[in-house]
Structures are given as structure tokens and as C-alpha cells.
Amino acid sequence: MHMIARSEIIDENRRDFIGTAATGIAVAGAYSLLPQPLQAATDGEAIRPFKVNFPDKDLADLRKRIAATRWPSRENVTDATQGVQLSTMRELARYWQSDYDWRKVESRLNALPQFVTAIDGLDIHFIHVRSRHKTALPVIITHGWPGSVIEQLKIIDPLTNPRAHGGDVSDAFDVVIPSLPGYGFSGKPTTTGWDPARVARAWIVLMKRLGYDRYVAQGGDWGNAITEQMALQAPPELIGIHTNMPATVPSEVAKALQFGEPAPAASRTTRSAPSTNSASSTSTAWVTRRKWRTVRKRCTASRILRSGLRPG
């Protein structure tokens, strides 16, 4: 069966979102707060402790630049058919300027064990939380674009301490959450070539460096691509993967998404998915049922503010 890359379907929506003025200012401003010396790798294979610190002067500068935004005229329609609405972006910019609590996020991150280590010429930042259960299974979890390790903070305790959340000791994981190269607190590549396959190789090195000889991997969005590459490279230590964003979808699903047609039956979608990966089959059906009406829609205020842009 012909398969169409899901990334082709959602690229249009991503271009619409990333082109929005206020979000661009907030993202660019936030990047300027990151520790810029983490560009080239240092100290060989050493694993160094890391703490987050957003300087007051940089926060003040960020707020000043958001306040100085030159806004375009309002759209000619009363809905989101021409893109993210001006009122939505004004509210988002106001939130970033006055309500977002950088110190709260800084404290949340610094309450966790964070480290930096040099891999393939680049400093890689990662969170590493070990479960108190000796039988815990290590898992490396990769975020997507545009995203960061903050997205995964809420899952750390349920994974490392499952009994506190209604689980069993056998459900416990040691959790490793790296920042992608050029994202968050990892170093910025100075050359091209950091594609999913190269990042996957770096993650394999990271897990070896942490001493794990048996682990699993998980990811969504670009984290999905990297996780699948880890499986293709098949290091002997990697015993399984889980993804929450299939890299491909059946052609009939892609066609229906493109033209706004009704969703194919879930049973048909499941049969069309690769039978060798039950997680991918389940994910494909789940995306079809639960995300059908949102994949092709542009962001609205409620979706933006619920989707992770307000972690503080």
C-alpha cells in the first residue's frame, strides 16, 4: 500500500503557526535567555551537572521587545480561516510579557537532576531521574518541534514512582530526557548534518555512557523520527520503542485529511497499519479517531494556550 508521510500533511499548518509574529518574538526572545556558551563540546566524555539560570536583565529585555511588537491589521474574517487571529496573538504576547513565570519554570527544572555531556562534538543537555526501584527499566524520551523537555516534566514522577500513581513496581522506569541539538539547553550545531539518524546515534552513545545495557525509547513528532531511527540502527541494548506520532499514515487516511473527507473506519485503519508494530497500529487508529478534526485546523486561542505554551 502506498504510504504518505504525515509530515507532508501538517507542514502547511506548521508554517502558518511559526510565521505568526508574536510567537516568533517570544520564541526568539526565549532562545536569547539560554546559556550561549553551550555551543562546542568540552571535557571529553565527562557528565557535568547543570542548573538553569535566566538573568534578570535578559528577562527585562525580552519583555521590552514583546511590548514593542508592531502588530498587523486585523484579519478580514471573524474566524480562523485566514490564520491565527490577531486577538489571539495579542493575548498570547500579553501573557508572555506579563504573566509567564520564568522563575517558577526555572525552579521546576532545577529541582530535577540535569546534566550536560559532549557527544559527537556537541554539548547535549539531559534530565536523568532514576527510580528508587532496582528493577526499573531505563527509557529515553525525545521531545518534538517546536518543543522542549518541559513537555515531559509531568510524566517523570508517574514513570519513576508508579506506586504513588496507582501502578506497580514492575511499571517503574529510570527516565532520561535529552534536549535535541540546538534546542533548550543543548549546544547549537555549527555545521549541518544533525538529522534524525545522527541524533539517534548520539542518544545511543548517551545511554551507553550512562551505563545502561538494556533500555527502551519513546518519542513523538521529531522525537518519533529519532526513536524510529534508533530502532533501525538496532543497538543490542535497545529492546523496544514506543511512538505517539506515526511517521506514515495509510494513503486513504492522508487523502481524507487533505480534502476534509470523513474518517475511514477505525478497523480499516488498523488493518492498514504495519502488523509488526502494535503500538503504531494503535496510534494510527487513535490519531484517526481523536485528532481527526484538529490536524487540518489552524490554532485557536484555547488550543494554543492548552498545548504547552503556558507551562508556568
Image (cartoon, helix red, strand yellow):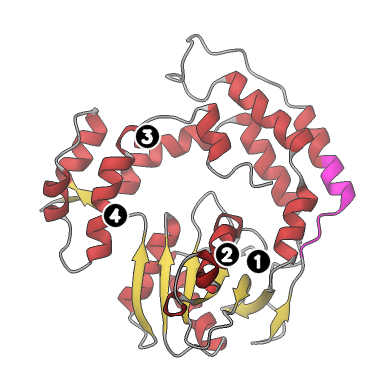
User: Residue type at mark 1?
Assistant: Gly
Foreground mark, 4 or 2?
Answer: 4
Residue 294: image tag: 3
Q: CA distance from mark 4 to mark 3?
A: 16 Å
Mark 2 near mark 3, Cβ–Cβ under 8 Å? Answer: no
User: Which residue corresponds to mark 4?
Assistant: 283
- Counting from the top left corner in percent of width and height, residue 55 is at 86, 54
SS at mark 2 in the image: loop
**For mark 2, what is the residue?**
181
Q: Earlier in the sequence, mark 2 or mark 3?
A: 2
- Label 1, label 4: how many angstroms apart (C-alpha)? 32 Å
Report the residue at 48% width, 24% height from top. 83
Q: Residues within 10 Å of mark 2 (few under 14, many from 20)?
A: many
At 72% across and 53% down in the image, what residue appears?
A: 105
Cβ–Cβ under 8 Å for marks 1 and 2: yes
Element at badge 3? Answer: helix
In the picture of the structure, the residue carrying the numbered disc 1 is 187
Q: Amino acid at mark 2?
A: Pro
